[in-house]
Image: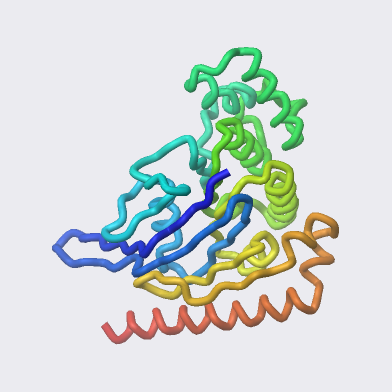
Amino acid sequence: MKALNVDDVSMVFTVPGGADVHALENVNLKLEPGELVSVLGPSGCGKTTLLNIVAGFLSPTRGQVFLDDDPVTGPSAERGMVFQQGALFEWMSVEKNVAFGPSVAGKPRAEIKKTVDHLLSVVGLEDFATKPVYQLSGGMQQRVALARCLANDPEVILMDEPLGALDALTREKMQGLVLKLWKETGKTIILITHSVEEALFLGERLIVMAPRPGRIEKEYRLPFAEMGLKKSPRDVKAAPAFIKNREEILSMIWEMEEEIMGRQEAS
């Protein structure tokens, strides 16, 4: 497993009309293999931009991302992405979606079948293997997206609001599945979310980003992800320490949003 290093990354976009937008400024972040990091911040703070740079979809204006000593220069199977909407082939079956990456990579058929069967069992979809994706609920589709990502055996899993479109009950169940997959696979995970509660529950490290230009404002090291492997989400989220951290971070985000609104009114 490889360490991920975001080294002094800045990103400037030039918008129509020639103005520059400073999306990120001097972001430094190092993840050891197997860490689960959640990233939180007000709208427009550059969370998704940072994730897209780590994925290799964007090249930073300054700085570099490394997996161990290897610079990230573009998309790679080493970094798997799970989007808010699963980006699945809806007309294809569940098993064919999960098998797609290994098939393109030229893996042997027997190996692909073994991988697909195992992953569908892990995400609880073995009974739906031959169903077309469009017949599944939103939560089940996100389980397919997770299995498809894992089928490529990436070093790092990048999640961009993967549970944001789900109802509250399904979302909480899926949070438990993310923790289970993290612990069982040992993968490094970066998860972007707008939910303070979700960021606290899933992140053994939680990064709070400041308003544009996006930069790391504060970092927390938290016990709640490990607790969530042994206790129900409701019990963890009712713990006094969880509530204290939640209120502190909510206040921080609220102040940032007020600052953004003040800037907009003044301009």
Tell me the quarter of the image containing the N terminus: top right
Q: Is 126 left, or right, of 47 in this rendering? A: right
Q: Is 110 left, or right, of 230 in this rendering? A: left
Foreground of the two, 95 or 132: 95
Q: Could you tell me residue 175's position as x and y percent?
A: 70, 53
Tell me the quarter of the image containing the C terminus: bottom left
Residue 143: image quadrant is top right
Q: Report the residue that reaches farthest toward the front.
A: 69
Rendered image coloring scheme? rainbow
Q: Is residue 238 above or below residue 74?
A: below
Q: Could you tell me residue 232's position as x and y percent?
A: 84, 59
Q: Is 162 left, or right, of 64 in this rendering? A: right
Q: In this view, does 97 lie above or below 53?
A: above
Q: Could you tell me residue 183's position as x and y percent?
A: 72, 48
Q: Report the residue that reaches farthest toward the top.
A: 109
Foreground of the two, 32 or 81: 32
Q: Could you tell me residue 239's position as x and y percent?
A: 81, 74
Q: Is residue 155 above or below residue 65?
A: above
Q: Is 56 left, or right, of 181 in this rendering? A: left
The residue depicted at 64 percent of the width and 62 percent of the height is 203
